[in-house]
Image (spheres, rainbow, N blue to C red):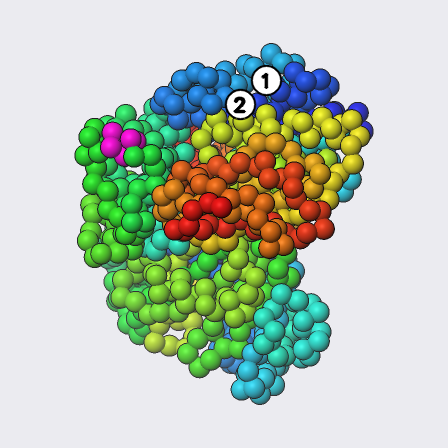
Amino acid sequence: MAEAVDVAVVGGGPAGLTAAAALRARGAGRVVVVEREPQAGGIPRHAQHQGFGVRDLRRMLTGPRYAERLAQRAVASGAELRIETQATGWSDSGDLELTGPRGREQLPARAIVLATGCRERPRSARLVPGSRPDGVFTTSTLQQLVYLHGERPGRRAVIVGAELVSFSALVTLAHAGAEAVAMVTEAPRHATFGAVRAAAALRFRTPLLTRTTIAAIRGRRRVEAVELSDGRRLDCDLVVFTGDWIPDHELAVLGGIELDHRTRGPAVDASLRTSRPGLFAAGNVLHGAEPADVAALSGRQVCAAVLAHLRGERWPRRLPILPEPPLDWIVPNAIAPHRPGHGRLLVRAHAELALPVVEVVQAGGVLWRGRVPHLGPGRSARVPARWAEAVDSDGGPIIVRVLRGRTGA
Amino acid sequence: MRRLPDFDFDVAIVGAGDVGCAIARELARFELRVALIEAEPDVGAGTSKANTAILHTGFDAKPGTLEARLVARGHDLLLAYADEVGIPLERTGALLVAWTDEEVERLPAIADNARRNGYERVRPVGRDELMEREPQLAPEAREALEVPDEHIVCPFTPALAFATQAVLAGVELRRSERVVGLERGDVWTVRTSRDALRARWLVNAAGLWSDELHRLAGHDGFAITPRRGELLVFDKLSRPLVAHVILPVPTATTKGVLVAPTVFGNILLGPTAVDIDRKDDTSSTAEGLAYLRDRGRRIVPALLDHEVTAVYAGLRAATEHADYQVGVDGESGYAWAGGIRSTGLTASLALAEHVRDELERAGLPLRERAGGLPAVGMPPIGEAMLRPHADPERIGRDPAYGRVVCFCERATRGEIRDALKSPVPPVDLDGLRRRTRVLMGRCQGFYCRAEVGALLGDDG
């Protein structure tokens, strides 16, 4: 049996690479990053546009440059990067099982950080009926085909979804010489930043069809058309399913740790500890896609508790944080009393609310009440966590809810 | 001087699904020149690929039919063959569950029917035992019959194994070649979309198109009405929910919706049964998917909390008859195996024996080839098998088996390479999927579709 490493990080995307570099910098000892792709960097590797690195690196980079930069920093910090190596499960003794060109092995580690990211729900998971022709992709597949393989995947595309990544798909299609004939969303409006939508409308003139779904995909070998819920038929040879992210939570589930059923990611406290001692989770595996730099900051956030665990700190007990509708989820979804951690909470709602008042309550007592700028689908709002100090360890779950039309106390 | 033969093949088999491939393999044992002609780009790519992947015992077949006899025999043959060549198969057994008073009352008749089919191992299971063995069943479950030999099998590997063995034994496989005309002179002239070939005997295993070929051959007697079956495949994380094939009590009109594990480690829910007009319409429908979800919720409620990995639809080659349509016309040198419905995969090896015997009786001389059929070993794509990615010795010999390309299904570069170099190589992504499991998983290509496409192209 190999000697245990100090920290194993699963996933070499923005969160994992950032966590590894930060852990090394703060003296975590031997840190190994396991990345199943031939290159580290994660999703930004094939998002060939600007806008990466603002919050974490204080720079404006393209996706591939950003991915490269994060990988270089991790390696320079002394973390070991094992590419083309997949963590496929857990051994009976709770170690990661790895498969890579150098063989099948177990990786004993004193602490493990799951940073396995997220993916877009494919057509089948969205139960879109019709035939099964070629030419139905997610944004990620589209971008890999276009940017990594130089292919031209089609001429006329319908984009399903209207969140930030959907506009990224729009840019990719333009790069590949394909026309986006429509952007289709079930929602009453797009779910990205107004400026992004406005720029896209000016530059691409792609119609945005709201309150519309794809009723069926048609075509034998290749996509020929989509039928819309309003009865219209759009001729196209490409359908791009965008967004609708789901955490890549397989290892978390196989590891038997508690999941939050709202995010489908691991349930974590504010220091990103999971329910299993020594196991942490960071980045988009916690909630689906946030911008890459937000995921990276989560990688930085996990360090303090990992280091504390390596020093022998006891794994704390925790209380759940429960969002009420129209809030869809909140991360972290638990809090360890007396050890509240730091950082902010991310909340996501399924209804559009401007300047809503949010309230945090425990056992009927208000811990915090305040305004957040915006709530809605497709992008998260941040709620400060300074109330965490006031949590009563015997007070039961913490409720987070939205008060509409009321001013703060 | 030696006279050139006035024919190219002794036997031309039209249709390389489970049935056609099994017949080709069976005839490959003998000193015959055999052609296997398939309209699709691959073997098993028509209705065979969308079967429910159950190895049937035939306990519920209509007693006295050819189907009942061939399914029972085929079950045993395929079970042994799976072991011999490495077809993924798990001996799960089935539980046929009654949900209402009326269904409970019908269980004895179903057990009786099984005995009339010569299947003696059906056993009643009380509610307590049922819930102990399948604790995730909805609480309305009442009683069950255990059918211990109803198993799950890979829906793809059988046709590939048959075809591989046939090709290695000298059968000429012609894919992407549709039969467009037939003429009978001294021998058959089979006109295809690419070629014309002459054969002394013609075997019709054309599945959904078997009725049309039958008429082209100058016969009549059955018509295919495609019966669409839609299926939902749930995420692997749902696999622990169910241990057996969960069968419904069949009604007069349908066998009903089942819940079954798959050999790839998923749970399958289906099929629907809707008669349709077009033989190429394998579309899923909003109504069908809603119906399946409703049924599934009543059988294993927790299943519906899981993500759906795949949705597909297959067409059963149903006819107006209650039995398979199989026969030989010795005069014109023509044999047919049509109207083979969802039991076709199970029955395939027995059907092949049966057709072989019929051909021999009608005058096809069968002289065994020395050495018999070549041994084959199919790729271990079953979840219960030692997969290459988890096999340290294999990776040690060849690191390509340690390089996972499809992360969801753990399909490796080595396996993709092997498939592309195999005797019956895939020509498209779908074919590669059926051989290696690439793109079959929960992400449906989010991570690897571009890379797999490139690998297929590189070697294609």
Q: CA distance from mark 1 to mark 2?
A: 10 Å
Could you tell me which residue is drawn at 54 percent across and 14 percent down? A72
Asked if residue A197 is among those painted magenta in the image, a careful observer would answer: yes
| Count of residue discs | 2
Farthest top residue? A76
Q: What residue did someone put label 1 on?
A: A74
Mark 2 burial class by Cα count in 10 Å: few <14, some 14-19, many 20+: many
In the drawing, does residue A274 fall left or right of residue A381? right
In the drawing, does residue B59 fall left or right of residue A293? right
Could you tell me which residue is drawn at 66 percent across and 67 percent down? B135
Range shown magenta:
A195-199
Q: Which mark is residue B208?
A: none
Asked if residue B299 is among those painted magenta in the image, a careful observer would answer: no
Chain that bears disc 1 = A
Q: Earlier in the sequence, mark 1 or mark 2?
A: 2
**Residue under disc 1 on the same chain as residue under disc 2:** yes
